[in-house]
Image (cartoon, coloured by chain):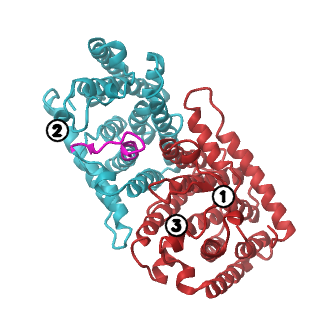
Chain colours: A red, B cyan
Amino acid sequence: MPSVSPTLASAMTEAASAVAEALKCILPKSEFPENRLFEAMRYGTLNGGKRLRPFLVMCSSRIFGVGGECALRAAAAIECVHCYSLIHDDLPAMDNSDLRRGAPTVHKKFDEATAVLAGDALLTIAFEILSDPRTHEDPAVRCRLVSALARASGVQGMVGGQMLDLIAETTQLDIGAITRLQRMKTGELIAFSTEAGAILGKASVQHVNALRAYAHDLGLAFQIIDDLLDAEGTEEETGKPVGRDAEAGKATFVTILGAERARAQATLLSEQAIRHLSVFDGRARPLEEVARFVVDRKS
Amino acid sequence: MPSVSPTLASAMTEAASAVAEALKCILPKSEFPENRLFEAMRYGTLNGGKRLRPFLVMCSSRIFGVGGECALRAAAAIECVHCYSLIHDDLPAMDNSDLRRGAPTVHKKFDEATAVLAGDALLTIAFEILSDPRTHEDPAVRCRLVSALARASGVQGMVGGQMLDLIAETTQLDIGAITRLQRMKTGELIAFSTEAGAILGKASVQHVNALRAYAHDLGLAFQIIDDLLDAEGTEEETGKPVGRDAEAGKATFVTILGAERARAQATLLSEQAIRHLSVFDGRARPLEEVARFVVDRKS
């Protein structure tokens, strides 16, 4: 990550290792034949990745003084949901991708049925993690986490966005529709990741709203850069096939705005995201850095 | 349902309509293009079915005096999980079934990608329903429901059982392994359906344990009859392809025990299930009838 500040890079690496360790504990090996399912779940979650969402959970938790285990468990739950969505997204019936983070996708490494089930199981375990008293002693807080995750990843969020994404392959969307699609497909889960710390810390409405506004802009900036990487990056840099959107004739921020305006828009959104954090009087510094990182990243 | 008592038949029909109405409210039509997803979710849930699990929730809720909307919402959540599992189970990569309840399966009616997403969305919405204050005013109760549903439907329950079922296609299982497989694949969700009323009603441990024991025997009896219907029923009677287990050379209760001993075993389990209900002094009469119905059913 050449364009990232050394502090952010090391904080992200540290958070990524902590989440990987937590996931290893949550997804243990089994002596029973269904261990194949655990293997696929581990394979689909422990294959590197930036762990952006877990990092957001941990940064936002820290603002409100939330302890390590609570934040880590919420982070692990969100990462399970993110990874399940990648596993299902890669399936032959969906994006039909053979490669993810430079390695065979779950259905290539195992088989399609196992990939479907591993995704299902990861989604399910996310709710098991959040509803467990170890995530927070107050059941009202746990319930809010469950409810917010379900909304962010369901029909009005991620899955609805995936559906729109499929429709976008055969329908030309305008910039408004694409913005809505991306807000649902990736924005809502990023927003929940940022909000999770505030829920855990029983933060004020003002603080929750500031984090939501931040995450909204961040998510959109993130997606614009994703489109740019797909249009301009190499498979080597990104660890996944590129040029897929153009191949599919799909409208993206880049095809509609052009690369230059798209990048300018992402930069604008990133700056705007940072401004929303001013209410935290410098306690949200890592989140500011994330907003810079997201537009500078190369993968 | 010729061999069911008229009282049970009409109670089940009434409960099934109530759940269907609740599902229609929970899965509204949308004016946005992703309405296709809602359509697939409605198609996959509103296509009849016995609604056994919702009926169990409603019966067990009534024992503890739990009000209508709470029970109905919990019932709808469980039915969403059950229907999601059928949609994914029917996929070409899994059982590759074209027919379900006498109609085209979701991936046949829509397409494979939509079926994957509809299943994902139904699983997700189940947790949204349970964590909603309308399901129960006490967040501790909602959290227990979420946690129990996640465990019943995850790696240690339904999804783990599905994995074992796939493995059973290429490995000969003994009766112990098949019992474990079926307990996970269908038993745990049936057990949670029965337990849900006790959780909603904050029942005593003794009562929860009695319902668990009942549901455990009921679930196994249910599965043995399922195997019998697959071996001996017709597509017309069951509304789905039959003879699939034998075709796949899969070990089932019927292939191992033979039809006669399998039926005797199911009857024994049903009687045993009913005995567990004696602690309720007649307040669990409908659950007793369910145990009789399950072994007498023809579809």
Q: Which residue is pictured at 70% across the width and 72% down the height?
A: A294
Chain letter of the residue beneath label 3 in the structure image: A
- Badge 2 marks a residue whose secondary structure is helix
Give the label on residue B185, or none: none
| Front disc: 2 or 3 | 3
CA separation in Å, label 1 and label 3: 24 Å
- Is disc 1 placed on a helix, strand or loop? helix
Q: Which residue is mark 1?
A: A200
Q: Quadrant of the N terminus of chain B?
A: top left
| Magenta run includes residue B87 | yes
Q: Are marks 1 and 2 in contact (CB under 8 Å)?
A: no
The magenta region covers B85-102
Residue A51 percent coordinates (x, y): 70, 58
Residue B10: image tag: 2
Q: Considering the numbered disc 3 on the image, is that residue within a helix, a strand or a loop? A: helix
Task: Work out whether residue A133 can be spotted.
Answer: no
Q: In the rendered view, tell whether residue A114 sits above or below residue B184.
A: below
Estimate how packed mark 1 is, as few (under 14), some (14 to 19) or many (20 or more) residues with alpha carbons within 10 Å: many
**Where is residue A37 drawn, in percent x and y?**
56, 38
Q: Amino acid at mark 2?
A: Ser
**First reached walking from the N terminus: tag 1 or tag 3:** 3
Q: Chain of mark 1?
A: A
Residue at the spot 39% in from the left edge and 25% down from the top edge: B250
Residue A96 versus residue A164 in the image, above or below: above
